[in-house]
Image: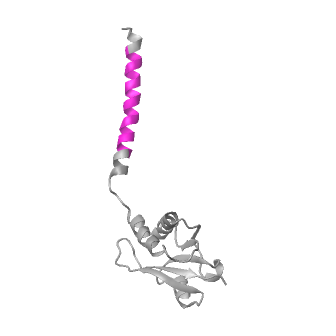
Amino acid sequence: MNPTDWRSTIAAALVTACFSFSLISDLRQALRKNESFEYAFAQRLSNALHNAPPGPLVSVGDLNDVLYDITLYVAFLTERQYYGNEIDAWSLGELRGGYYLVVRADTTLDRESASNAQAKRFFSAPSSDRSLNREINVYFVKAP
């Protein structure tokens, strides 16, 4: 056999091995049961929204907060529209009506939603849930 054939065979084997190791690692991680807290919580919330009236989802909070991830997962699982995460919304007047609002408890927006006739508490998760610093409330806000 020609020495050039050996070199190309070795080169092809090395390239194949490099790609195979990363693929095997990714495949092993994908097949391992490693469910994030946010996804597990979103499944609970999406089950609650299963028979609920239609409406898009909105979250209010910092982008580093779990609310953003949870609401995005719920939108995916329920096939509802996601209007995004409002970082600096302080009142319901700043948001459109006819949606599900996901907020942290004991915030200004949560207190306003609890006392507003257009908003009805739909779902509440206690602070005893893992990774939640405070309770999370979900309100259905009717269009004016």
Rendering coords of residue 37 (x, y %): 38, 66
Q: Give left or right: position of 111 versus 143.
A: left
- Residue at 52% over, 81% down: 139
Of residues 142 and 105, which is closer to you in this image?
142
Quadrant for residue 96, please give it. Answer: bottom right
Q: Seen from this angle, which residue lies furthest right?
A: 144
Rendering coords of residue 72 (x, y %): 51, 65
For residue 45, above or below residue 24: below
Of residues 95 and 48, which is closer to you in this image?
48
Rendering coords of residue 115 (x, y %): 55, 91
Whether residue 65 appears in magenta in the rendering, the answer is no
Count of numbered marks: 0
Q: Seen from this angle, which residue lies furthest front?
A: 51
For residue 81, above or below residue 100: above
The segment highlighted magenta reads 6-26
- Residue at 47% over, 68% down: 70
Q: Quadrant of the N terminus?
A: top left
Q: Quadrant of the C terminus?
A: bottom right
- Residue at 38% over, 45% down: 26
Q: Seen from this angle, which residue lies furthest top?
A: 2
Of residues 94 and 1, which is closer to you in this image?
1
Q: Main secondary structure of the magenta part?
A: helix
Figure coloring = one colour
Whether residue 19 appears in magenta in the rendering, the answer is yes
Q: Give left or right: position of 70 versus 127.
A: right
Rendering coords of residue 54 (x, y %): 57, 74
Q: Give left or right: position of 26 versus 103.
A: left
For residue 77, above or below residue 129: above
